[in-house]
Each structure stands twice: as C-alpha cells, then as structure tokens.
Amino acid sequence: MELGFTNPFRRWRPKGSMYSLKCSQCGNGFLSSYSLEAPICGSCMQAAKSLDSTIDYDIQCTTCGNKGVIYSKKQCHACYFGLGNKDGEEK
Ligand SMILES: [Zn+2]
Ligand SMILES: [Zn+2]
C-alpha cells in the first residue's frame, strides 16, 4: 500500500531535549527544543513579528549581529525566539 506523501513525523526529529513551554502571550502550551526566556507560540510570534514598533533598529543583535532587536532586549526576533540557527530548510 502506497501513501502519496512522506510521513511528516519523519522530519520531526528533535536533536536535543524538548521543552514543554507555555506561551507567555496566550497561555497555549507548545513544545520547543529551546528553553526560551519568553515562551511564545507560533501564532503569537507571527503577531509579535508584525509589530515593528517593538524593534529597536539602532541596536545589533548580540547573537547574529543583525540590526534590529526587540525593544529593551539584546536579540533580534529570530534569535530571541530561538529561530536563528535552524539548520533545516523549513519555511
Ligand atoms: Zn500564544
Ligand atoms: Zn539575531
């Protein structure tokens, strides 16, 4: 019997331990391979990303060096939320 698609769980292979986090915005639980300082789920992150007013473009991210960090933080959105150094082609 043939399935017309690859098993999505095949790609889902966390390298390290997973953290069970609770979104600091909406309270939804979610999993991440990063222990985040300010846990945020996917949908809230999308909302946060669209808030340009929370970006301080004068400051460099201490992790990746990109200009534009979260206001009052020292990291850009990608690094702060743990998306900075993904080595997959997930998009
Ligand atoms: Zn959320
Ligand atoms: Zn960064």
Image (cartoon, grey):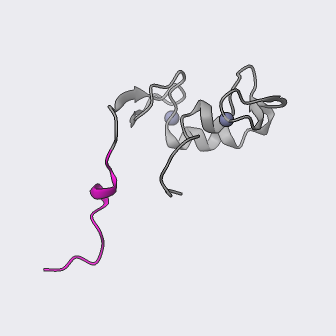
What residue appears at the point 52 percent right and 32 percent down from the top-left corner? 40
The picture places residue 41, in percent across and down from the top left corner, at: 49, 37
- Where on the picture, by quarter, is residue 63? top right
The quadrant of the image that shows the C terminus is: bottom right
The residue at the far right in this view is: 58
Query: Which residue is at the front of the view, 57 or 38?
Result: 57
Query: Which residue is at the front of the view, 76 or 39?
Result: 76
Q: Main secondary structure of the magenta part?
A: loop
Q: Is residue 23 left or right of residue 66?
A: left
Residues shaded magenta: 1-13
Magenta stretch containing residue 57, yes or no? no
What residue appears at the point 27 percent right and 64 percent down from the top-left corner? 7
Ligand 2, what quadrant?
top right
Q: Is residue 38 above or below residue 55?
A: above
The picture places residue 17, in percent across and down from the top left corner, at: 32, 31
- Where on the picture, by quarter, is residue 61? top right
The picture places residue 74, in percent across and down from the top left corner, at: 71, 23
The picture places residue 31, in percent across and down from the top left corner, at: 38, 35
